Amino acid sequence: MSILLVEDDASIAMVITAALEAEGFAVTRCDSVAERDRLLETQSFAALVTDVVLTDGDGIETLDRVRARVPTLPVIILSAQNTLDTAVRASDTGAYEYFPKPFDIDELACAVRAAAATATTTSGEAESEAEGLPLVGRSPPMQAVYRLITRVLRNDLTVLILGESGTGKELVAQAIHQLGHRRAGPFVAVNTAAIPAELIESELFGHEKGAFTGAVARHIGKFEAASGGTLFLDEIGDMPMQAQTRLLRALQSGRILRVGGREEIAVDVRIVAATNKDPGPLIAAGQFREDLFYRLNVVPIHLPALRERADDIEALARHFLAQAASEGLPRRQLSADAIALLRQQPWRGNVRELRNLLFRLALLARDEMVDAAVIEPLLAQAAQGEAPVAEAVSFDAAVRGWLVTARPGEGEVYDAALAEFERPLFAAVLAQTGGNQLRAARVLGINRNTLRKRLTQLGLAPEGSGAR
């Protein structure tokens, strides 16, 4: 990606250019407003880094010309005039970041990398790049988030992401990983609330063979799986209290002990946690450990609700429609009144709700250009829809949880597990086929008589339904 650097001090420009080229950027440098404008007319850039005092004008006062040409180009402002007025002027322009001189060159490089990654320009090259990026949006609330992200890319400080469900907390965690110095390592996400209390230690720290019934082999936990990378602990506010104690010990010592193990293992992971709940009331109610909160809350990042960043809705909508098209759905465009309608919605489900609507729209709309009249019925259906489904526990975790809680006798594990699995499976298929056992047998790929026999044994066959 290309960066435009506007700096009239040759020595500073040389240092910045070397740092950005080391990050893999191609740097184009000029020292005047006029040359900047000419380059923006003929070339595309992922970000603009500009000084304030230039040979022929003010880098801040002339940014309106930049906005007119490339409205979404991220701008990073440098200034030797380290006054509050300069900082306020930079903020008023919607600058992505402001660095008073002298500045930390590594921090500037991180800011440029993050700004370039979150750019949503109108050029075809930038649009194709933006489709794979974790975060979309240029509103002031999101710029505040981006600034915090840039502050943690070169260190391993623990980050706590706070925000409502559906705001994209995991995407922020992914951005911290993908843009940070651990990007070559793994990114491991785990929903701590979805793991049964009996299994939390095994899931996070692993277990040795024979540690408990069903532990037929060594299991590597999430901490070890994330070694050298980032471990994302989602929904930490719903984590069982017993599990919080075990997690706190691991965070304090930087070492883990597998269940059934004898030797502690040092772990090298960056911790990013998230919750959709306010930790204060949880701590007051005794539902969350205060010492664990302070251990996690080193760098808090508050993710805004979608209703607080309505200026991003149009960009998000375009992004999701492009994503839908890349997954094989018809290509759609939104009219001005459709965008206006989307901006008026409360979006209680936040970005996740908007994404679901746009994918549904891509599937159901008849014409490529979609207006508000087409979207209104979909919004009404969504308002009357079912409650959100809680995130499911992984099948692997569910099996291990069942082994711990059900505790089948030796020699009975297979038959007991088969019966436990068949019951919800057969019930779901029967519901799907309206109770028609012949169709259910075809869906399952088994003989109808076999199905009828198992339904009777499992207590799922209503009286008089066997002939269906």
Image: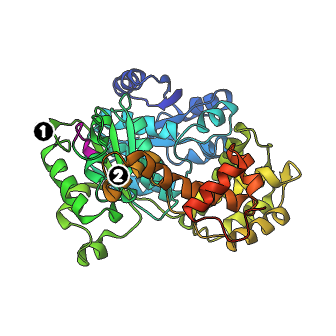
On screen, residue 48 above or below 424 = above
Q: Nearer the viewer, mark 2 or mark 1?
A: 2
Give, as a single range, the part of the protein colored magenta: 204-210
Marker disc for residue 264: 1
Q: Could you tell me what secondary structure mostly forms the magenta stretch?
A: loop
* Spot occupied by residue 434 in the image (x, y as percentages of width and height): 75, 63
**Mark 2 vs 1: CB contact within 8 A:** no
Q: Nearer the viewer, residue 249 or 152?
A: 249
Residue in view at x 33 percent, y 64 percent: 237
Residue type indicated by callout 1? Glu
**Count of numbered badges drawn on the protein:** 2
Q: Nearer the viewer, residue 231 or 50?
A: 231
In screen coordinates, is 38 left or right of 56? right
How would you rate the neighbour count of disc 2 (Cα within 10 Å): few for under 14, some for 14-19, many for 20 or more?
some
Marker disc for residue 403: 2
The answer, for residue 394, to whether it is visible in the render is no
Residue in view at x 76 percent, y 43 percent: 329
* Spot occupied by residue 412 in the image (x, y as percentages of width and height): 37, 49
On-image quarter of the C terminus: bottom right
